[in-house]
Amino acid sequence: MDHKTETTLLFSFLFFITYLITIVSAKDLCNKNDKNTLLKIKKSLNNPYHLASWDSKSDCCSWYSLECGDATVNYRVISLTIFSGQISGQIPPEVGDLPYLQNLMFHKITNITGQIPSTITKLKYLRSLRLSWLNLTGPVPEFLSHLMNLDNLDLSFNQLSGSLPSSLSLLPKLSYVDLSRNKLTGTIPESFGSFLAEPPYLLLSHNQLSGSIPKSLGNIDFNHIDFSRNKLTGDASMLFGAKKTTFSIDLSRNMFQFDLSRVELHESFAVLDLNHNKITGSIPVQWTKNSLQILNVSYNRLCGRIPTGGSLQRFGSYTYFHNKCLCGAPLDSCK
């Protein structure tokens, strides 16, 4: 056997050994503590069929609804996303015993009840918390302000009550907040004007919030705002501005009162819904320079001629009707 053949055989043998080592090690990547915690979570949820792959005899990194990190975190569980399924019970407190968790989601499981467990505060690496379309009750907990790496908070479509915790503004990376479709009451905290991560999303629709919008919110260049279907009053004009790159604002079905004539929009502004308020003034001529995709100012107290140009005539009459004295296309001609 010549030297070249021996070298080839040696490399082939080493490759085969490396492959075997990889296969063997891959069978047991999951951390034992994480595995035990996950099995406790499964038991707490009454061993649902949805989690049938959670078998103690297999590697938990291969289980459905979760993800392990790479070798830099020793293959610890970094994501737990339980979506739909016939599952009942409460969010297991053991979720706080997955110390490397970055993403936690329970979504569209209407038989999940109870309150948000305080053990979540142990998840110091948590970046995204989505507990939505459940049947959670109780308050939006103050202890969420301990999650200093959180950038995404979605607690929408629940039965949460009480007031908005002002401490959420202490989270330095928080840029997405969705608390819509709950039973929240009280006012929007002044501290919400000091969100550090921009441009943020602030979605508070379909609650029972009242009072006026804090002027401090005018300091923020939001991406999306949705305060629709609440009991909010007063001036909301501070949310707008020609230099703000906001994409969408929905203030519909509240009791806002301000002069629309002085509202300026950035040229990239796309979605504006102000229907069913008490807004006065006229539609600014400056809006003809915008490429609005959605507009609704119906059921207000607006007057004057609808400016001609831009996208303002592209919308149907439903966009403008039930105002005090708006006129011009697509409404009736001005006299």
Image (spheres, grey):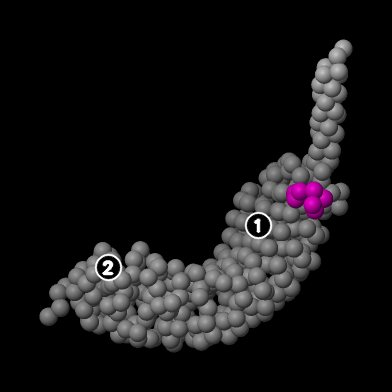
Q: Is residue 124 left or right of residue 267?
A: right
Image quadrant holding the C terminus, namely bottom left
Q: Is residue 220 left or right of residue 146?
A: left
For mark 2, does the 10 Å Cα neighbourhood hold few (<14), some (14 to 19), or many (20 or more) residues? some
Q: Residue 245: x and y, percent?
A: 46, 71
In magenta, the rendered stretch is 68-75
> In the image, is residue 6 above or below residue 311?
above
Q: Nearer the viewer, residue 322 or 59?
A: 59
Q: Residue 117: x and y, percent?
A: 74, 66
Residue in the image at 69% along x and 58% along y: 104
Q: Nearer the viewer, residue 207 or 21?
A: 21
Q: Nearer the viewer, residue 277 or 113?
A: 277
Q: Residue 279: x and y, percent?
A: 35, 83
Q: Which residue is mark 1?
A: 106
Image quadrant holding the N terminus, namely top right
Give the amino acid type for the residue marked by disc 2 in the picture: Gly
